[in-house]
Amino acid sequence: MALDEIERQDYALSQLAVMEDTQIAGAMGLLEGDYSAEVSFPWRGLQELTFGPLAGEFWIIGARPSGGKTTFVMNLLQHLIDTRRPTLFVGMETNPERLRVQWAAWACGLDLAPILRKQWYLLPNDAQVQLRQHLEWQRDERVRELVTFAEDERLSVNRLRYWMDRAAGRGVGVVVLDHLHRMDYGGSPSDLTGNMNEGMVQLKSIAKERNIRLIATAQLKRLSSSDVLEDYMPPALSSIKQAGAAEAEADSVLLLHRSLKPGASDGDCRMVRQGQLPISAVAEQGTMAVRVGKLRLDGDARDRTVPLYVHKGRLFNSAVARDEFAFRLTGSTTHTPYTGA
């Protein structure tokens, strides 16, 4: 064997050794610390079932239109700030200014629609004062360090990397995308599904290479335009629109839907579909169901469901906690019906 060939092989082997040492050192690093350093969900039942997103993971939160995606991520965003987890929030359905008002309205327990319509007479007398105080709080440097709102309405994968680079100095470890179907994946306009599938592969790669938690919302397909109870039926993992690769690339998928009353029978549902009973006869008001469509680290969690309880956009572990919050807010335990957001 020629000397130069032997030298090339020796060099290749030395590079392999360096790579393997780096891998083992990284594996050792995964054993450091404990679960308190991980990002958690603010809801005990969901946290115990899923353990929350780990570094390097790509999670999808799916729901039908007006199915609660924004409600879910707004609650999660506040929890990330409360637990001091720097976050990049990419809201592509609305601009950052409106997102900040939406966040303030949520935090103050105020309905968003009359705020945006400037129907102040429908709100408490001090509503504008509350909102301005929260917006001033958002200006605080300690808050700025914890959340960055990107400004792109049609984000490409390259622009996502750009925003992550801009926020790198803040130690961003969580990226929230709202939502996948608003992203610009490039490619041919005639192959939206193929473009989006390739985009899923790239998003998963970003999560791994940056060692961040990438949490993206996604639209689910409606299977029937005539079933008045479709929003109350648990969605299938395959119902994510135009994104077959999401099933393979996502580490975990959570599917949101409205809840039926525990005692609602098949006969009751049939009568609702036939128009003989109102939807309220079977619908569990003020409740969101979170179904595990996929959990890579625990296959036994698949198809298990956790209920969350809703009042004015807030999500709670229990109906008791929800009603206590409602009483503190309004002096009444009457909660607002969950209609999705």
Image: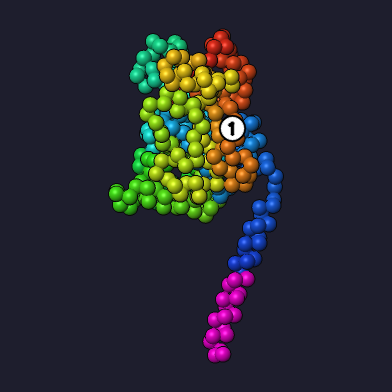
Between 238 and 75, the one lying in front of the other is 238
Between 71 and 278, the one lying in front of the other is 278
- Magenta residues span 1-17
Q: Main secondary structure of the magenta part?
A: helix
Query: Compared to 299, does 275 lie above or below?
Result: above
Is 114 part of what is drawn in magenta?
no
The kind of residue tagged 1 is Thr
Picture coordinates of residue 130 (x, y %)?
A: 47, 19
Picture coordinates of residue 244 (x, y %)?
A: 44, 47
Residue at image location 61% in from the left, 75% down from the top: 14
> Can residue 138 be seen here?
no
Left or right placement of residue 175 versus residue 192 in this view = right
Quadrant of the rendering where the C terminus is positioned: top left
Residue at image location 54% in from the left, 85% down from the top: 5
Picture coordinates of residue 250 (x, y %)?
A: 51, 47
Residue at image location 39% in from the left, 10% down from the top: 121
Between 130 and 150, the one lying in front of the other is 150
Left or right placement of residue 181 versus residue 235 in this view = left
Picture coordinates of residue 261 (x, y %)?
A: 56, 20
Crowding at dot 1, Cα within 10 Å, few <14 / some 14-19 / many 20+, comes out as: some
Secondary structure state at the residue bearing disc 1 = strand
Between 186 and 297, the one lying in front of the other is 297
Is 13 part of what is drawn in magenta?
yes
Residue at image location 33% in from the left, 52% down from the top: 187
- The residue that disc 1 covers is 305
Quadrant of the rendering where the N terminus is positioned: bottom right
